[in-house]
Image (spheres, helix red, strand yellow):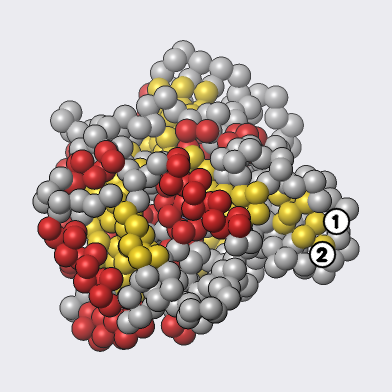
Amino acid sequence: MTLQHAKLNGWVKEVAGLCRPDSIHWCDGSREEYDRLMKRMVESGVATPLQKRPHSFLFRSEPGDVARIESRTYISTANRDDAGPTNNWVAPEELKATMKSLYAGCMKGRTLFVIPFSMGAVDSPIAKIGVELTDSPYVVCNMHIMTRVGTTVMEKLGADGEFIPCLHSIGAPVAPGQKDASWPCAPLDQKYISHFPEENLIWSYGSGYGGNALLGKKCLALRIASAMAKREGWMAEHMLILRLTNPAGKQYHLAAAFPSACGKTNLAMLTPTLPGWKCECVGDDIAWIKIGPDGRPYAINPECGFFGVAPGTSYDSNPAAMDTVKENTIFTNCALTDDGDIWWEGMGPAPNHAIDWKGRDWTPDAKEPAAHANARFTVPARQCPVICPDWEKPQGVPIDIFVFGGRRTSVMPLVHEAYSWDHGVFMGATASSETTAANIGAVGNLRRDPFAMQPFCGYNMADYFGHWLAMGDRFGKHAPRIFYVNWFRKSPEGKWLWPGFGDNIRVLKWMCERIDGTVGAVETPIGLMPKEGDLDLTGLAIPDADLKELLRIDADAWKAEISDIERHFGQFGDRLPARIRRQLDDLRKRLG
Ligand code: O2Y
Ligand code: MN
């Protein structure tokens, strides 16, 4: 299939001239196309069909190509300061010259796939169209699940519709007669995930994994979209979207930002333990938010699939996710059981024998885990048993609550509420998390991850803080209330203080009641917090001392926190908005 779109046709021709694929395939997004590509990957031994899960397949990546690579991710703007201190930067001409020499002939022996895709339901006024050119059939199948690919997108594109060009190559040409690798990719020092936000352009080379290769997700929907959103007056956020319905039938919509490894997917699919409360998932990772005709912020989930972390997911931690992945799922870097199913650490009892993610025999006494810590499932969102009936509503859902959070074993209380919009932006700007084995850095290091956007902001983070302040001014009386949560506080003896998972509804209930003005709060130096009796702990056997510790403000620890925030803000120099600096001064004063 080809399009009568001169700009797109010209770009495809130009890329083909540079990358020299053997053939070009225009994707129509059909089930038949997916099945044909998958069948070829099964025949070549790259994909393993799973006996226990209909229409599901297991892939094993190259051990050096297992995650997003922040050190190889670039925001390339004409002026270095426009990318800011939190992004890697190379000047556009230099980066393009380097990458062009890598792209030259990189698709020899392969097919160039043209994937027109929509981020957001095609009829949504908030949606954007991208076109990914890739030489990876694995990427095509994943994009089928994660985005809307197909005829309707092509029709919307028409002859001259706008699209965001996304060029991807695994960077591994095959010579005639050469046996292909099962996960071909380029060495680390040749991997580049590059963004040119001033021209809405993405170039990725050398990796076939996740966020590096499925360019609609982190590259388009966050890095490029955040820069577009700043220019156009909307928001592209690293946030799940959740609908809560109270026992009286009143709905609330919440958008929440958490760094990796903080249970974001679990919260997005929460099974509430409080009777009468219902939670429905609108999105698990990204929110695009625009001001609606009534002045309220409306959010859509631009994706239509979940690319979730597998290890740790179980019927205890996230039953909805477990039911979602029963069929039509691509698993990557999970273990394969002898009866043709997948398994990962934290799923349940270990099998006596399996094939690990590196393709080796594995038994429970093995030294290494059977699944990689960043093993993933790719699955259609519509399969989620708690998907919200309005998850594809073109105009989105109205947001009442913003939540920020992170993983902190101390200092941060279970929940606190911002005094004002600016205070809430300060909370987002200073959000932090301790690193775990599943994310980057040494275990237990504190990492500031403002708005969980540190790896995903397509421009200077200080200007992004300014954009949040400006959006708050525009929301005015419709501005959502802002809260900060920490499900991960431990006692001095190292015991988890909060049960988490389905019991997190108790904290969300307090937020809803704060909005309705039906529950109190106490003023503390760091924000508004539930008073004794304000949190609904019915049926929960949580000792008083634990609750006190969960909500305790340690003034000395907070003073140390201020020094760390000073250091964090220091990197932005004069570009840090004065309104944010003022919030730090106010916090210092309140702490005395
Ligand atoms: O490792 C990758 O390539 C994927 S990272 C990812 C995937 C889904 C949702 N969120 C993330 C993330 O790192 O925030
Ligand atoms: Mn994410």
- Image coordinates for residue 518, horizontal then vertical, percent: 43, 22
Which amino acid type corresponds to the residue marked 1 in the rendered image? His
Q: Assess whether mark 1 and mark 2 are in contact (beta carbons under 8 angstroms).
A: yes
Q: Position of residue 585 (x, y in %)?
A: 33, 62
| Residue nearest the viewer, comparing 260 with 99 | 99
Disc ID at residue 361: 2
Residue 333 visible somewhere in the drawing: yes
Q: Is residue 322 left or right of residue 215?
A: right
On screen, residue 347 above or below 73: above
Question: What residue sits right under mark 1 in the picture?
Answer: 353
Given residues 276 and 364, the one toward you in this image is 364
341 sits left or right of 403 in the view: right
Residue occupying the point 19% across, 59% down: 8
| Figure quadrant of the C terminus | bottom left
52 or 332: nearer the eye? 52
Q: Is residue 188 left or right of residue 552?
A: left
Find residue 252 and report its horizontal and vertical position in percent. 40, 27
Q: Relative to 561, is 386 above or below?
A: above
Image coordinates of residue 5 in percent, x first then y, are: 15, 53
Q: Residue furthest front?
A: 177
Q: Mark 1: few, some, or many residues within 10 Å (few <14, many ≥20)? A: some
